[in-house]
Image (cartoon, helix red, strand yellow):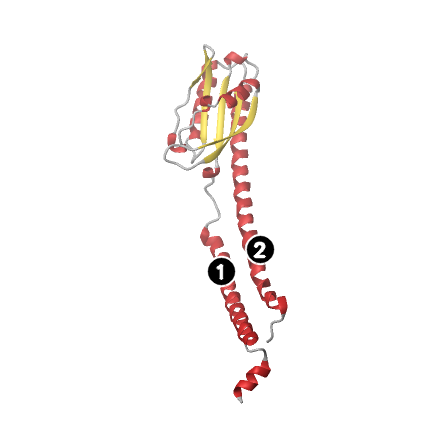
Amino acid sequence: MHFNGNRKYLHLIPLVILAFLAEAMYYASKKIDAAQLQEKYIQIIESVDMIAAAVEANPDRIWYDHEANIRDSIEYLDGLYQIYGAAYKLIDGKLEIITTRVYETSIFEPLEYPELMEEIFANDSGRHAIGYTPRNQTFRTLYIYYRWMPLYSPHGDRYLVIGGVSEHSIQNRISLLETGWLWIAVIVTAAITIWPVILLIRLGHIYESRNGPDKYRAERR
């Protein structure tokens, strides 16, 4: 086969297609992780809203019953795998934590972030994202949902509940065993494609170095 001009590079088209396929697979895996994280975040938001609904459903209930309900619920939430949960109460104008933290989720103190606290005191509820690196752990972005409760009480008598998740909160990730065969197929296909291309290009160079079939026949004579 004679390789003229750029025609020999047509054999690289399968490699380009494989490169696009690998990129598409990587992008898809990232989108799946993002969707799982968003679903986990929604679950935390719904959990905090459910606690608020239970607290606000009975305005005549004694305050320490509300506090016990909030404490038990948030400590359960905080005990879930890599989930952040904490409840605070304003005491003499300062936020004091009323829940026992489970530091398996990594040490995080929202009171140390002035921008977050400014936002919290300006709104009844909201969402916020903070990037930080816990001690002896890797960097992560913590997606926070905060809410004051109950809203029928004066601001000084409310409780602040905060829940948060990060990419480390995802437990049911798609494993390498489930997707590895796709990557193996791409690698094997790439190897099978590359080797003939290399041979064809080498043969093309040999062919051109002999100036075509006329020189080859002359050498045989």
The crowd level at tag 1 (other Cα within 10 Å; few <14, some 14-19, many 20+) is some
Count neighbours of disc 2 (C-alpha within 10 A) and say few if under 14, some if 14 to 19, many if 20 or more: few
Would residue 86 be seen by someone viewing this image from the given angle? yes
| Residue at screen point 49% across, 23% down | 161
Q: Give x and y (percent) for residue 73.
A: 46, 26
Q: Position of residue 9 (x, y in %)?
A: 59, 65
Residue 102, percent across and down?
39, 29
Q: Which residue is mark 2?
A: 20
Distance of label 1 from label 2 (alpha carbons): 13 Å
Snapshot quadrant of residue 80? top left
Q: Residue furthest top?
A: 92
Residue 140 or residue 11, whichever sits in front: 11
Q: Residue furthest bottom?
A: 221
Left or right? Give the position of 210 relative to 140: right
Q: Nearer the viewer, residue 114 or 7?
A: 7
Camera-nearest residue between 174 and 57: 174
Q: Residue at x 57, y 82 (%)?
A: 215
| Quadrant in which residue 177 is drawn | bottom left
131 vs 193: above or below = above
Q: List x then y, in percent, for residue 141.
A: 49, 34
SS for callout 1 = helix
Q: Earlier in the sequence, mark 1 or mark 2?
A: 2
Q: Which residue is mark 1?
A: 187
Three-letter code, disc 1: Ile
Identity of the residue furthest to the left in this view: 136
Question: Residue type at mark 2?
Answer: Phe
- Could you tell me if residue 149 is visible in this image? no
Image height of 13 relative to 141, above or below: below
Circle 2 — which element? helix
